[in-house]
Amino acid sequence: MPTVAGTPRKVMKRGGYATQAEAERLRQRIDQLLAIPEAGPTGDQARRDLLTAIDKALKNRTALPDYDQMRRRHASGQAINATMTVGQWLDEWLASRRKIRKSTRRSYEAHVRLYLKPHLGHLPIDRLRVVHIAAMFDAIDADNEYIRAARASGDAKQRAAVKGRRTVSPATKQRIRATLRAALNRAIKQEQLITVNHAAFVELESGKRPKAKMWTDEHVAVWRDNRARRAAAEAELAAARERRDASAIARLVVEIDDLDDTERPSPVMVWTPEQTGSFLDFIGDDRLYPLYHLIAYRGPRRGEACGVRWTDLNRAAGHLTIAEQLVQLGWAVEAGEPKSDAGGRVIALDQLTLAVLDAWRKRQIAERLTWGSAWINSGRIFTHEDGSEWHPAEVTKHFNDLVAAAGLPPIRLHDLRHGAATLALEAEVDIKVVQELLGHSTSVLTRDTYTSVSPRLAREAAERTAAMVPRTARQGDATGTDGLPSVSQSRKMTLGAPSQRKNAQVSTGAPPGTRTPNPRIRSGRHTPPRCRGVSRARVALARPGRACAGVRGSAGTQCGHGWSRLVSGWRCTAGR
């Protein structure tokens, strides 16, 4: 073996090879491995590691180290005989991500801690394959099934074991894979630890965004029935607890949970304009009415509404600039930039919203004078009495309490933003304007989420489409369809008349019952009688251009049909 500074030359002897050529091929592979480190003292440590790895492989009769893998490790500065695991690389990758938002980092850390490291962290990164990643998602699916089964169980212990645990949705699984893909891409491009990103080849259920639905009268009726059944089940549950009926308690708990799960037709529900107006009228005296009014009319996100400052409001121009938002990390809150580049935007304000903000400003100034030096000058538009900013979670909880008190069908605070988009579409605002109002990066997201929400818009679209087809009223006797349009005004066609189109593909043809030149095809209306005047033995006596003189039918009328050419000769077209 090659010499290494400070150590005597090492000699390796191994036998048991079938042929000299086999032994020589092994020797050549060892020479290739030992040629990876540069010559001289700078490559001594790498040569020591290679010699150790080669000696171990020969003693254990295992495969020699992979040449490409050893070369990549040496080029990236890693120890030759070290094996980095997926977990070690994920930790190193997270530590190197310095330019990401704190919310993004928090999401990455959760994915790594809860899913990636428990399932994949022990694997050498260069041994990670599609089957390993697929097994992780299979385990997540199995855990989802366990949670669902435990919730549906009447066993109190099983239900308590999964209390507070949520199933992993298809969208979350897509984000988990995206985190792994980002880490493995870094391992490929910068560190050259691997050559293939196997996370890209794992098939997952698409994480589609839920479609927004409106609380129509039909949906509201079903919701009220659901709440009535839930109230009855709650009363029955209270009675079962008094008499300590364990089986009834378990059954009713599962029934109440099922009613809660089916309370909303869709995860994203939107109020009608009338319901939105009813809610705003109900909370007119509430301290947070101006904030909810702003979200309902102009659609900022919760963090954006909580984070707007008086300096962002241009009263003269009538617009509000979204330049900062309050981001919730756990329970802690910090100010940050908008969610995306498109999130930083200018929102035009209507006169009613401007009047609401003017009234709120007067109230806030009065409170500031009352508090004096104890006033907290946060600069926010929406504050507590002492000037401190609102916690976003408090704004959400207060909204939910107000919705319940108003007796309206439930929506999330974020759905109030969806309602603002629906109102804009109901007002026939261009989709591009709605996109910029909401701060979406493209109008595709706006179209996919909101264009099918409003039943009124759908009905109007159907009516406008139907109006494009000119029709005339039906003439004649009264029938079950009396008064229905039947004939187009612009293209009137006479029944039975031949088509006037050029190059018509279908001609009028012969009268019904006439035999076609193909003896196997008959008219679809009725089958004519066979010609009895010409037998199969006499078909050769027929002539082209001469009418058949045979007799057909019980009346004995002359046939008069033509002749068709068969393989065996000529034959009357009315016969078989």
Image (cartoon, rainbow, N blue to C red):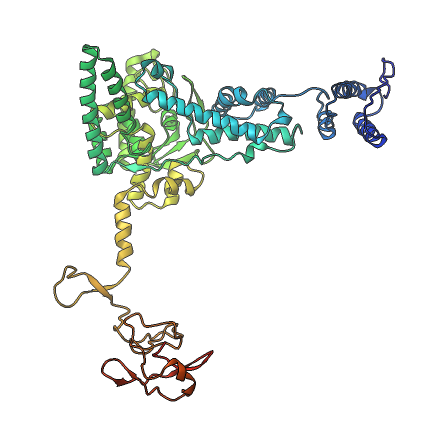
334 versus 492 height, above or below: above
Visible in this render: residue 375? yes
Q: Position of residue 524 (x, y in %)?
A: 30, 70
Q: Is residue 287 visible?
A: no
- Residue 568 percent coordinates (x, y): 46, 79
- Residue occupying image coordinates x 23% and y 17%: 248
Considering every residue shown, the one lying at the far left of the view is 478
Residue 409 image position (x, y, % from top left): 24, 30
Nearer to us in this view, 435 or 28? 28
Residue at left 18%, top 61%? 484
Q: Residue at x 29, y 39 (%)?
A: 423
Left or right of 87, for residue 558: left
Tell me if 169 is positioned left or right of 242 in this view: right
Q: Nearer the viewer, residue 469 or 139?
A: 139
Quadrant assignment, res 239: top left
The residue closer to the viewer here, 552 or 536, is: 536
Q: Is residue 428 above or below residue 344?
A: below
Q: Residue at x 45, y 36 (%)?
A: 206
Residue at the far front in the pictured view:
537
